[in-house]
Image (tube, helix red, strand yellow):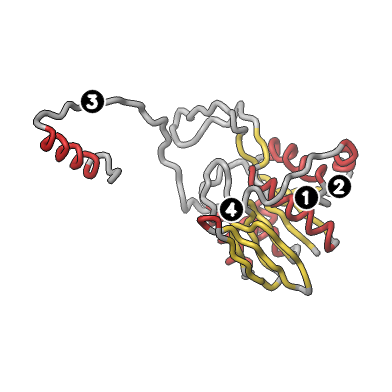
Amino acid sequence: MKIILCMKQVPLKDSQLKITAAGAWVDEKNLNYEINESDHYALEAGLRLKEKAGGEVIVISMGPAARLKQAISQALAKGADRALVINHDQPLFDPLVSAKILAAAIKAENPDLVLTGLQSDDLGFGQTGVVLAELLGMPHATLVMEIQAQDGKLKIKRELESGWFQYIELPSPAVLTVQSGYAPIRYATIKGIMEAKKKPLKEMTLADLGAQMPATVQMHKMYVPVKSKKTQILQGDAKSVAKQLAEKLKNEAKVI
């Protein structure tokens, strides 16, 4: 079973983010990066499937080359078999563009299953996996909590709201977006870290893939919310004050 995992790097959760002088994005010069949280769970799902059904897990990631290596090395150390790296230095704000680039690299691999995390910790669109399925012409499911592969089909457990779950069956190949908390994630062993250095890693550029990055979505301005306080004193008897308060809660605060 050939499984491809789409993996993203995001700033460390405790990073001190500063907006650039242009005000269109955060200053990335001094940031450290880590694997996106839900992608850890997608990797775990892929590794568990490989252990049961055999095959290989291929990690694909894109971004600046300098910060790709650490994330890729960690995934290979945990048990992924090889990696595909798409080098580019421009920030991506559009899940459609991201999906188009990933699809161009994935099609050549002809996988049985494509996994992504549910959403990224930085932008949080939660759309890349869904759009990727459309571009690849594959069925898909989101919020996946369990995957079983049997007789060329995938049995899926999806998390719904209010503690409900849905059980569905999909043909393979398919694209699945994995929910955080899928299963306990493993740590890389010393042996795995040493073996990761010898595993194949293929580097590509957008030109190699024949992919383009049209500016369909642009970030015009980012800013830190301004904290402010305002006190109003309502005058009148209890009935009048209650009426004024209800109107303000409904029309200004919009909480009722």
Quarter placement of the N terminus: bottom right
* Front position in the image: 146 or 95: 146
Q: Amino acid at mark 4?
A: Ser
User: Where does residue 168 sit, x and y in percent of width and height?
Assistant: 63, 69
Q: Secondary structure at mark 2?
A: loop
Compute the Cα span from label 2 to label 1: 8 Å
- Count the marks: 4
Q: Which residue is mark 3?
A: 231
> Is residue 118 shown above or below 13?
below
Which callout, 4 or 1, points at the residue further toward the start of the chain?
A: 1
Label 4 to label 1: alpha-carbon separation: 17 Å
Determine which quarter of the picture holds residue 114. Answer: bottom right
Category of crowding for the residue at label 4, using alpha-carbon neighbours closer than 10 angstroms: few (below 14), some (14–19), many (at least 20): some
Q: Which residue is mark 2?
A: 199
Check contact, mark 3 vs mark 2: CB within 8 A. Answer: no
Image point 63% across, 58% down: which residue? 144
Label 1 crowding class (10 Å Cα cut-off): few <14, some 14-19, many 20+?
many
Residue at 87%, 41% (x, y): give it.
Answer: 192
> Measuring 71% from the left and 61% from the top, which residue is drawn there?
147
| Cα–Cα gap, marks 3 and 1 | 57 Å
Q: Residues within 10 Å of mark 2 (few under 14, many from 20)?
A: some
Q: Earlier in the sequence, mark 3 or mark 1?
A: 1
